[in-house]
Amino acid sequence: MAIEVPTEGFSNVAIYTILPFYVLGMVLIGLASFWINNQSGQIRLGPLTLTGGKVDAGAQSFLGAGQGVGSLTLFFTMAASLYSGYSISGIANEAYTFGFMAIRWIPAGVALYAAFMVLAPRLHALGKSRGYLTICEFIFDRYAEPASSPLVPHALRLVSLLCLQLPVFSYLISQFTAISTEIAMYTGGGHWSGPGMSRYGTMITAGVVMLVCGLLGGLRAVAYNDVFQGMILMVGCVVFFIIEEQELGGLGGVKAYVTSEEYKNVTAFGYGKFNNVPNQDGGWSTASFASFILKVMIAATMFPHLTMRLFVARDSQALKFGLAGMNFTFFIVQLSTMITGWVAVSAFGGGAEEAGVFGSVAAVVRSTGSGGEFASALLLTAAVCAMLSTADSSLLAFSTMWLRDFYLPYLRPSASAKEQLLFTRVMGVLGLALGLFLTSMSIRSEQPWNLSNLFSFQTVTPIHVAPAVWLGLHWKGLRGEAVLAGMLVGLAVTMAFTFSNLNVKLKLGLDETKEGWSCALIGFCFNILVTVHLGIFFERGVQLPNGPLAQFARPLNIHQLFGTDIDRLCHPLLWTLMCVLIALTTPFYRDFGSPDHFVGSIASWAFVSLFFSGVITIVVAIAYLVLWKDYQLDPVPSLYPEPDDEKVVAMSPQPKAVAMQGMPMQSPAMYMQPQFDGRMPPGMGMYPPMPPPDYRMMQQPFVNAAAGYAHPGAYGVQMSTMPVPMAHGYGPTGAHAQVGFA
C-alpha cells in the first residue's frame, strides 16, 4: 500500500531550529575568513586560535585563499562543490522515474576524476608558477607563441570564456531550484506564501546568505564552508540510508515492489527500466548511458569551479590526496540519493510525482515521530549544504573569470588590488541576480526545468574547451590556429545539431539524437578531428608565419618545462586499462532490452556497472598516490603594470642579489637572480615598474658569453637598453643588459 505524503498535522520546529544554526555557522565562517584574509597576526577565541593569512597581493587573499588550501580542506571543498542540487534532488527524481538508469552518475563521476589525471599535475605546477586561477589564463599563454597573429590567443581566451559561462548559470539555476523545491515541499510552503517556507522566499534568503558569506571571505570562506557543509552532507547521507532501511523497507522492499505486477500496471515504462537491460539506442538506452559518461568525463574537467581547485591547492601533496579520495565519496552521496529515489517508488507506489522526491521522503520520515522529525530536518539541512556549496563556488569562479580573463587584460591592466576586489564583488552580485532571475523563470514556467536535464545541457559548450587544454598540456607543436579552428567547428556542429530537428529532446532541455547520442559529443568529435589534423599539418607541413607576441603574454614551452617524457599518469598502458574499465560500466555486452535477473536487490547489469565503477575508483586512487610526478617550476611574474598602491609594498621575503656560479658580484657581466623561500604571490610585480620583457626568449638555456659559460637551469631574457633590477631599485643601464630568472 502506497504511503501518503503528509500535507498537514506536522511540525516544522526541528527544521526551523537547525537551519538558523546552519546559517549562523556560514556567516561566522565568512567573518573569520574576512579576518584571516586581511590580517597577519593571531587572535584567540577561547580554545581556538585564528592565524592571519594575508599576502601582499590583496586580490590573491580573496580569490586564491592566500597561499592556497590544505589537504583536508581541499578534499571537502572538492566534494561539496561537486555534490549539488543534481546529486540530491536531481538524482533522486531521476532514480524514481528511470529506475536503475540513474546508475550512470557514478561511472560518469569516477571517470571524471580519472580524466583529471591528464591535467592535474601540470596545471597545478603552472598555477603555482604563474598565479593562474582560471583555465583561460593557461590557454592564452599556451597559444601566444607561435601564433601568426596576436588575435589567435585573444580569440581563444574570449571564446573559451564564453563557453564556460553555461555551467556557471546552469549550476546556479539548479541549486536554487532544488533548494526552493525541497524546502517548500517539506515545510508545506507555496510559491510566495503558505504555512511553511515559500519557494521564492527560500530562494532569495539562500542567495543573500551565500552572497554575504562570499563577499566577506572569498575563496577561503567558500572552502571553509565546504568543510562545514561537507561534514554535514556525509553524515546526513549515511543517516538517511539507515532510516530508509529501517522505516521504508530499503532496497529489499524496492525489489519486491518493482518486480511485481502491481507496479507494472502503474507504469510499464518504469517497470522496464527496473527489470530490463537498456535498449541499444534511443532515449535512456545503452547509447545514451555511454554518451552521458563520456560527455561528463570530458566536459566537467573544464567546469570553472572544479579547475579552480587545481590551482588553489596549497601544494601537490594536498591535491594528490584530495583527488585520490574524491571518487570514494560517490558511493556515499550519489548512491545514497539514488537509493532514496528507488525507495520512494515502493513507498509512494511509483506514480507521477509532482513534488520533489527527496523532500517527500524526508516528510514521510518526519511523520514517524520526534526522532524522525529531527533526523529528517538534519537530512534536509545536508541537502541544503550540498546545494549552497556548489552555488557559492560557481559564483566565485564566475567573478574570477571575468576579472582575470576580461577586466584586467582588456579594460584595466593596472587595476589596484582594491579595484580588483570591488570588480569581483560587483560581478558576484550581478551573477547572483541573474541566477535568481533565471531560477524564478523556471519556477514560474508550466514545466519547471528538470535538474538532470540542466546538468546534461550545461556540458554543450565547455566540452569544446577541453582539446585546447588536454592536448596543449602535452603536445608542444600544437598551434593556436588549429585549436581555434577545431573549437569553432565543434561549436558550430554542436549548435546545428542541438537546435535542429536532429535533437529529439530539445523541448526537455536535452541535447540528444534519436539514437541516444549527445549532440555535444558529436560536435566534440568534429572538434578533435579538425584540431588534430590541422595541428599535424601546421607542425609537419605548412609553416605558418610567426606574428608579434600578444600583449601581457607569457609564452610557455611544454617540453622545456615538463620534459619530453610522457607523464606516468598518462601512460598508454594505464589508459588502456581505464578505457576497458569504463567501457565495462555500460551494458554493451548484454542482449539489449532483454529481461534481467537481480543480484541481491539490484538488476545484474546495474550491479556490474557499480562493481567496475568501484574498480575504477581503486585504480585511480592508487595511480594518484603512486604515479603522481611533482614539477618544480620557477616563478614567472605577471606582466600587468604594477598599480600605484602596490609599488612600495615589499615582497616577503625580499629578493636577494646573488652571483651566478663562478661569477663574482662585481663582475660587469653579472645578472640578478631573484631568490624566494616561498611562492611569489600571483599578480604581483617582482620589482618597481620596468619595461615589460619579451618572454619569447624565456625557457632557453641562458648563455653568458662574457663569463664564458652556459647556465642550463636558468631562464634567460635578453633585451637591449633595459635597466637591470636591483633588490631596492634599478642598476645601471647597459647596451646589452641581461636579466635571468633561475
Image: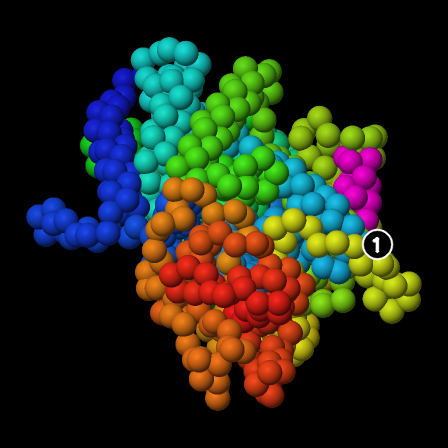
Comparing 286 with 194, the one in front is 194
Residue 283 on image: x %, y %: 72, 40
Horizontal relation, residue 322 to residue 29: left or right: right
Horizontal relation, residue 704 to residue 195: left or right: right
Residue 200 on image: x %, y %: 42, 17
Q: Is residue 6 covered in magenta?
A: no
Comparing 283 with 547, the one in front is 547
Which residue is found at the position 46% from the left and 61% from the top?
Answer: 730
Vertical placement of residue 167 versus 588, above or below: above
- Judged from this view, the residue extending furthest toward the right is 542
Prevailing secondary structure of the magenta residues? helix
Q: Is residue 626 visible?
A: yes
Q: Is residue 262 visible?
A: no
Sort mark 1 into few (<14), some (14-19) or many (20+) by Cα contacts within 10 Å. Answer: many
Residue 485 on image: x %, y %: 81, 49
Comparing 670 with 353, the one in front is 670
Which residue is found at the position 54% from the left and 78% from the top?
Answer: 669
Which residue is found at the position 41% from the left and 56% from the top?
Answer: 681
Residue 170 on image: x %, y %: 57, 34
- Judged from this view, the residue extending furthest toward the top is 193
Horizontal relation, residue 742 to residue 538: left or right: left
Which residue is found at the position 41% from the left and 11% from the top?
Answer: 192
Comparing 490 with 603, the one in front is 490
Dot 1 lies on which element? helix
The region drawn magenta spans: 485-498
Vertical placement of residue 214 versus 571, above or below: above
- Tag 1 residue: 530
Horizontal relation, residue 404 to residue 595: left or right: left
Please identify the quarter of the rendering in which residue 372 is found: top left
